[in-house]
Image (cartoon, helix red, strand yellow):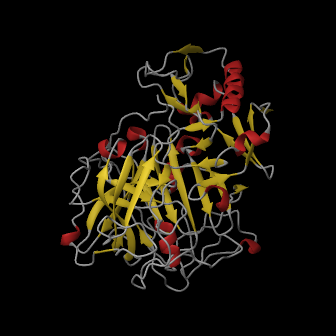
Amino acid sequence: MAQTPIQLTTFFSFFIFLSSFQLDPTTVHGLSTNSTTTVLLDGARPAMVLPLFLSPPNSSKTPSNLHRHLQGSNANNSPYARMRLYDGLLLNEYYTTRLWIGTPPQGFALIVDTGGTVTYVPCSSCEQCGRHQDPKFQPELSSTYRPVKCNNGCNCDNEKVNCVYGSLYGEMSTSSGDLGEDIISFGIQSELAPQRAVFGCENLETGDLYSQHADGIMGLGRGDLSIVDQLVEKGVISDSFSLCYGGMDIGGGAMVLGGISPPSGTVFTDSDPVRSSPYYNIDLKEIHVVGKQLPLNPSVFDEGHVTILDSGTPYAYLPAAAFAAFKDAIMKELYHLKQIRGPYPNYNDICFSGAPSAVSQLSDAFPPIDLVFGNGQHLSLSPENYLFRHSEDRGAYCLGIFEHRYNETILGGILVRNTLVMYDRENSKMGFWKTNCSELWERHHGTGAPAPLVSASNGLLGHMMQLLIMAVIWVPVYGLHISHICKS
């Protein structure tokens, strides 16, 4: 296992994109100034509900009965999106969604990344791009494509013709290319009209980006090039989105672009957009193991970008002092288990055998962990939120929390399995709600209109998350593959 802390969180970006671009009125022109005092869905700007499901290739499995459904306001008959998403986390340590670009549309599998802003796909002109899941984007075949022309608000190519972007990631993979704009579609099931958006037309990729099976990246971070920012600026969604990752062995889940009403029991923390943009941070102050606070100064979590929550990173990383205290507390609780070597001989994974093999029984052997935020609220973590299965020893588990060599605190997808994470950008906070993400988005058999959104003031905030009722389509997951993340 490597100790490079970030897999797909942008470490440095050398593109500049300002709202001074003189683009078509349907494209992004800057950050939205609209704000609200709640996270209730704005009926005029519907949330786009994007289901994630995990099933074997060519599976004919029928989803079980719906356990929960999501309701939202559609009082103004606004369109809503129904879009297929794919979950490759169990195989390749990332989630993907499918987007379609151009006219006629060309489809791509994109890694969902809250640590990056630009969305990009390999273009037909790229001679140094890997072989990915889908053919390269061919702008010459799209009647609606046009490059973003060089201007004072961007970095330009050597010929001073087009705007360009470039990204360098923590494990030293890179992506660069031209900026273009075209019609982006969210799937044939979406009732939201396709939108013009700016994206990266990739001409060069290296490292993991070259070898991964997924085509490219869908950037959800803060910034004008972010898909979220562009949709917010166009007024088609409110300034929020949510992710819900499935459990250890099941996978699945969902993504929502737009605001939702937080369910009863949601744990909140402040998120300061100034300190860590484009990343999303949380106000972590303490870590408890079996209810006992680790002997740490809260300032240990404030190094660098504060505590970052990143969907592009599969595991979690703590500063040296915090990791040492965490490891010591965990080892004291696991004296009854046998410590074994990890699956990767070159890395010092901390692994154990002798625990129950069933995920539902892991709490009998592994202790509970709590993250405590600055407002005093606790986010409880079960074993599946900090363990991953040993790939060679059936029934053995390894810690999915590692030491960060630069003393950053980065919390990846493992910590939010079976947790709906609400990125409430409008109100500068994050929300966490424990749920079964794999079952949350099963097929809804109703065909009636969505129920009206009920405000929290009516005492119904504890009811189901209130989004658009929608039908969800089960689809097979493609066998994506990348090399094991380098953490060193």
Is 302 in front, or is 216?
A: 302
Q: Is residue 239 above or below residue 271?
A: below
Residue at the image point whose x is 46% and y is 73% from the top: 153
Is 145 in front, or is 70?
A: 145
> Quick check: 24 left or right of 108?
right
Query: Could you tell me residue 158's position as x and y percent?
Result: 31, 64
Residue 9 is at least partly visible in this image: yes
Residue 479 is at least partly visible in this image: no
Query: Could you tell me residue 474's position as x and y percent?
Result: 36, 56
Query: Could you tell me residue 70's position as x and y percent?
Result: 55, 65
Task: Name the outermost residue toward the left.
Answer: 141
Residue at the image point whose x is 59% and y is 69% from the top: 259
Question: Picture quarter containing residue 383?
Answer: top right
Q: Is residue 155 above or below residue 245?
A: below
Query: Could you tell me residue 267's position as x and y percent?
Result: 71, 53
Question: Picture quarter containing residue 475?
Answer: bottom left
Q: How many marks?
A: 0
Residue at the image point whose x is 56% and y is 69% from the top: 467
